[in-house]
Image: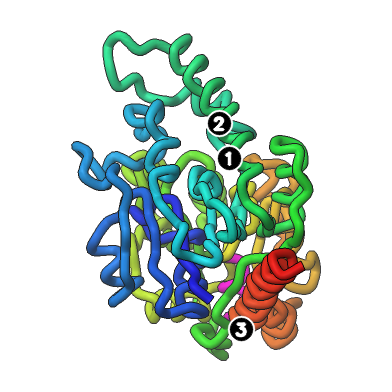
Amino acid sequence: MRIALVHDFFTQWGGGERVLKVFSEIWPDAPIYLIAYDPKLTEEFLPGKKITASFMQALPGMPKAFKYYSILSYLPGMPKPIESFNFDDFDIILSDSSSFAKGAITHGKTKHVCYLHTPTRFLTSDKEEYVRNAPIPLPWIGRPFVKLLLKWMTNWDLLASRRPDYVIANSRCIAKRTEEYYHRQPDSVIFPPVDTRQFTISPQIDDYWLVLGRAEPYKRTDLAIQAANQLGLKLKIVGGGTKINELKKIAGPTIEFLGRVSDAELAELYSHAIGLIFPPKEDAGMTPLEAMASGRPVIAYGEGGALESVVAGVTGEFFYEQTVESLVSVLKNFDANKYDPQKIRAHVMQYDVKNFQQKIKEIVEKVITTTASSINA
């Protein structure tokens, strides 16, 4: 079986990139196709892999141009890079996509399985926010032009969503959103994986809370900071992002910004934390899985994928309004002693990477077998 892996951009290390890495561990010889990438990141996380980038890699400002909102400069030409790849020599391509990778074109016997992280946010659920906050890269571009551009891109996005032969949604939340925006019911739902081997339960718990994620507006790290300020709680924040300096300005003396840390350091931080604060509305959410694999409870915003992985009263708690007041109320009443670390870790074992890999392999083999049967019939 000749298989290629397809991803949007590899310009940061996040949940989507972790899924791609898991795919590359299933098929270690599979070439990886990327619209654009950061060579240092791919060398660190995908060492020795055969990487093929689109022509966009050579454009001015790339790959650093692909940041939150700043891709607007290149948006009119964005369909072309993913459509420029030729996959005729492959039996199947496996894409994981939160934007453009699902739009890869295949012909004839080549089939396309897409692991869908989300319908493209800035063209669906977050469109109004994008229009409101997007920078204007050129003087002659105004908000009306942005709206027209996004309308055209939305039409392309809908077309692209129909190209995969088989769609896997990464959560029930995304399955519903796929039906809403793409008018397509996913063929399967498989929650993202966690490598439980990397995380352990510690008998020694420290006095800090943990927040992990890119410093971008939708991550709502500001809620955790303001709640910690109000209650005088120690809070450690892992990760960088475009809004990191703004977050530092509102942080009090009990807040510590750690930046990017190694996997080993992160595992230590999880295992000794009181728990993880997870304030965004995420499509699925991998950091709660990592915290629970360490036996630590999660306080999560009660929408999106967290509702599927966190069990209130067993592995954590929810706050149901995305406000400082709602989060503060839960933190004030939180009793870490009521949670059993062993039960928390046992719960998350269903999301272990080995189970995930087995499910993905079975689907790919099913699509290949079905295709072969159709050709021979």
Horizontal and vertical percent position of residue 46: 34, 72
Tell me where the magenta segment starts and ends, as one range: 287-297
Q: State the residue position of label 1.
A: 160
Local SS, label 2: helix
The residue type indicated by label 3 comes to Lys
Tell me the number on the disc at residue 156.
2
Q: Main secondary structure of the magenta part?
A: helix
Query: Which comes sooner in the sequence, label 3 or label 1?
Result: 1
Q: Give above or below for 255 relative to 45.
A: above
Q: Nearer the viewer, residue 125 or 275?
A: 125
Q: Residue at x 51, y 15 (%)?
A: 148
How far apart marks 3 and 2 lie (CA) works out to 35 Å
What colour scheme was applied to this rendering of the protein?
rainbow
How far apart marks 1 and 2 lie (CA) works out to 6 Å
Image quadrant of residue 12?
A: bottom left
Q: State the residue position of label 3.
A: 354
